Amino acid sequence: MRSNRAKLRAVSMAATLPMIAGALALGIPAAHAADSPARDTLKGTKPLWATAKADKGATSNNAQVKARVYLAGKDAAGLAAYAKAVSDPSSPQYGKYLSAKKTESRFGATKAQVTAVKSWLKSAGLTVTEVTQHYVTVSGDVAAAEKAFGTQLHNYTKGAKTYRAPAQTASVPAALRGAVLTVTGLDSAPHKANHDDQLPPPDAVFKNAGPFSSYYGSKVAKSLPDAYGQKAPYAIKGYTGKQLRAAYGAGTYTGKKVRVAITDAYASPTIAYDAGKYAVKNGDAAWKTSQLHQALPKTYTKTEECKAAGWYGEETLDVEAVHAVAPNADVTYVGAASCYDDDLLDSLSKVVDNHLADIVSNSWGDVEASQTPDLAAAYDQVFQLGAVQGIGFYFSSGDNGDEVANTGTKQVDTPANSAWVTAVGGTSLAVGKGDSYQWETGWGTEKAALSADGKSWANFPGAYTSGAGGGTSKTVAEPYYQKGVVPDSLAKANNAAGNRVVPDISAIADPNTGFLVGQTQTFPDGSQQYSEYRIGGTSLAAPVIAAVQALAQEANGGKAIGFANPSIYSKAAKKGVFHDVTDKPTGKDLAVVRVDFANGLDASGGLLTSIRSLGKDSSLSAVKGYDDVTGVGSPAGGYVSSYAPKKH
């Protein structure tokens, strides 16, 4: 499961942006460029869907606008350069992180910049409603917004709906050059992540039917038809921490004294109870007092639109998976007020501004075509501010493979496409008897149902259902750390100069070889009861990798790893560090049998039996070396220990 911003967020991505000095190697978009002596344009603020054909005329001058003006800080180029230097193992500045206070002092907006921005906005007739170290929020009518940002606002059709958007790229007075990063909110299309306001109760109960395998291959469906010339095993009941720790080389490390943050929207009202009960039932270390924290907003908004209860499962999965793999790590859950980008950005900024953790797991995203350059710039700024402090961000790569089946267009997901985050892809994992690692494939599922007479699989191998997201970005330049590791055939698929390829690393994600979680759910009689079920998606892979990074930080003597990609790619060719994940790891096609309750709860509505093929990720393939399903691979026995200081 992954709160995919195809569910969660609807924004609109434009073409590749110019690069700011010092950030070219990492593909960081420029905030603005001069278009005249009087004004500086804010690139990407006119969405691609605001075309002449879709133009329905000027928006009423009296209509209301609420916008955020993001502050560039005093040295945007210097921030990108310093973030790169402290993250690069070959740099003399590697690991020389700054405190949150020094980061703000060195790179944050000055009082003079904030004053100038506020004065400009007020002089246009806008009302300043909020000022933070990252942005100034304003409200006012369309006429005032047009005056401030040097553009007319028109109504445009987008699909079946009509939204407001700038008719020209927004701009700011040249006197504010270097002070304004971008502005969001001039267009009224929803900028959100999917996955009044009281949080709703937990979602309706979901349970898995059996038979199950307790480890891969422990129970074979001998009475059912063959698949690929052999009997297939039943799906895993759900791996637990002991099995995942063994698979990914945890050894004796537990994440002691390492802080991990998790961001999602909203907050599960039963998380402490659920996480505590799950740990005891499934052999994980009991949670210690004050080991699990929550940093929550004062109020929640848009709970119906964002399907708030659906986010509870995301938080539960993330918290339980991190604890299962790194049982002594300190975990802070940071809940956003809604699934909208502004609120998700606030939750990420809260982690950075208060340095709540060194490792941040994020199980949400949307397709790249839905990301606008203005928001990309705002996200990248937060990731850079984190990098200079030694904070690393881990984002799930998506659950729809190359996205063609989902959107009709081959593309990657965002923010996983950012050159400043670690994109986590997904695998199907086989852990055998005695918690022994057997193999992994790239996660990609084809599903065929059992025929009515039970003698064959109908239309075998069936239709594609889901798989790990990956591929080549169309908007982000190839970062330096991928060069020489990522094949040119991938990096240059969309651009001869090379673009960012996703993912970077991978871990268990296939729901058919998934993880067991425990969560309070709402039963048909209206009662709320704790229940366990198997789950997957790259929203499982992200917290698993975040937890593995907590183990690696402990191995590193407790010193933060920070933005990990340069380090991950520098280890790509080292023996024993990564499992080089490939499809058909046994030399044969693989599949598992899955039995589901038709009603999601019990056998009263009948059973649905299907065969789920492994390693069939749309047009993406897991091959030897780097690939766009699993990145450099999954952590092997030597990964965690590779971070231990070398003995001289």
Image (cartoon, rainbow, N blue to C red):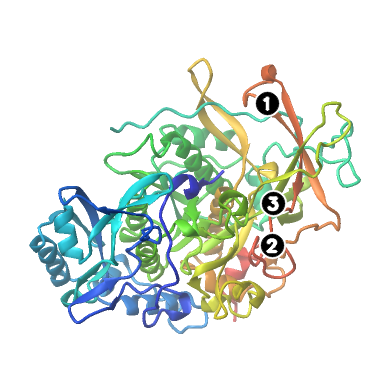
Q: Residue at x 62, y 45 (%)?
A: 241
Marking on residue 637: 2
User: What numbered label is drawn on residue 597?
Assistant: 1
Q: Nearer the viewer, mark 1 or mark 2?
A: 1
SS for dot 2: loop
Q: Would residue 287 be visible to someone looking at this image?
A: no
Q: Residue furthest top?
A: 525
Q: Is residue 151 left or right of residue 194?
A: left
Relative to 360, is 573 on the left or the right?
A: right
Of residues 345 and 462, which is closer to you in this image?
462
Q: Are marks 3 and 1 in contact (CB under 8 Å)?
A: no
Res 145 seen here: yes
Q: Give the labeled residue for mark 3.
A: 444
- Badge 3: how crowded within 10 Å, few (<14), some, or many (20+)? many
- 551 or 399, which is in the foreground? 399
Q: Is residue 50 above or below residue 240?
A: below
Which circle's residue, 1 or 2, is located before the other in the chain? Answer: 1
* Position of residue 522 measured from the top left corner of the image (x, y, whole percent): 50, 24
Residue for point 68% across, 60% down: 620
Secondary structure beneath label 3 = strand
Give how far apart the Cα atoms at labels 3 and 1 are: 22 Å
Residue neighbourhood size for the residue with mark 2, other residues' Cα within 10 Å, grouped as few (<14), some (14–19), many (≥20): many
Above or below: residue 487 compared with residue 414: below
Three-letter code for the amino acid on which mark 1 is drawn: Phe
